[in-house]
Amino acid sequence: MRDTIDLLEAIGSDASLRHAPAQDLADILAMSEATPCLTKAAATGDGDVLADEFGDRPNPPTQVSQVPGWEEEGDDEDMDEPERKDDDKSLPY
């Protein structure tokens, strides 16, 4: 059997395969000794069948972190650069 990831990469990089009719792609994959899951996914257009091959692992929930002291709304005046006097010869940094 050929590696499914390699075959998916080949399909993605070749427009003639990427836009081929589902059954034609399934036939090509069968001749290429693709796994039964990949061949079925191509024939049916259902990528969920690949869960059998890659394992049915749900995506972990996304964790949103909050930085202490950070507020979405607020006065941004403090974030402006300090005003300089025209006669101030110091460097701005």
Image: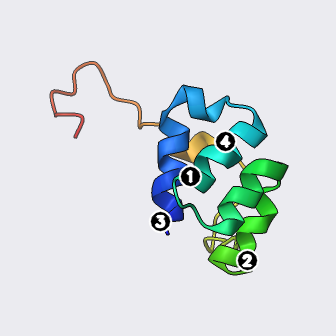
Q: Which amino acid does label 1 sit on?
A: Met
Instruction: Determine which quarter of the picture holds residue 54.
Output: bottom right
Residue picked out by circle 3: 3
Q: Earlier in the sequence, mark 4 or mark 1?
A: 4
Q: In this view, does 4 lie above or below 89?
A: below
Residue 25 disc label: 4
Q: Which is nearer the eye, 30 or 58?
A: 30
Q: Distance between the residues labelled 1 and 3?
A: 14 Å
Q: Distance between the residues labelled 2 and 4?
A: 20 Å
Question: What element does badge 4 sit on?
Answer: helix
Q: Position of residue 36 (x, y in %)?
A: 68, 67
Question: Viewed as shown, does residue 28 lie left or right of 5?
Answer: right
Q: Which is nearer the eye, 82 or 51?
A: 51
Q: Nearer the viewer, mark 1 or mark 3?
A: 1
Residue picked out by circle 2: 52
Residue 49 visible at all:
yes
Name the residue: 45% across, 56% down: 6
In the rendered view, how is the structure colored?
Answer: rainbow
Q: What residue type is labelled 3?
A: Asp
All told, the count of numbered labels is 4
Q: Nearer the viewer, mark 2 or mark 1?
A: 1
Q: Position of residue 1 (x, y in %)?
A: 50, 69
Residue picked out by circle 1: 31
Q: Is residue 34 above or below residue 17?
A: below
Q: What residue type is labelled 4?
A: Leu
Name the residue: 57% across, 61% down: 34
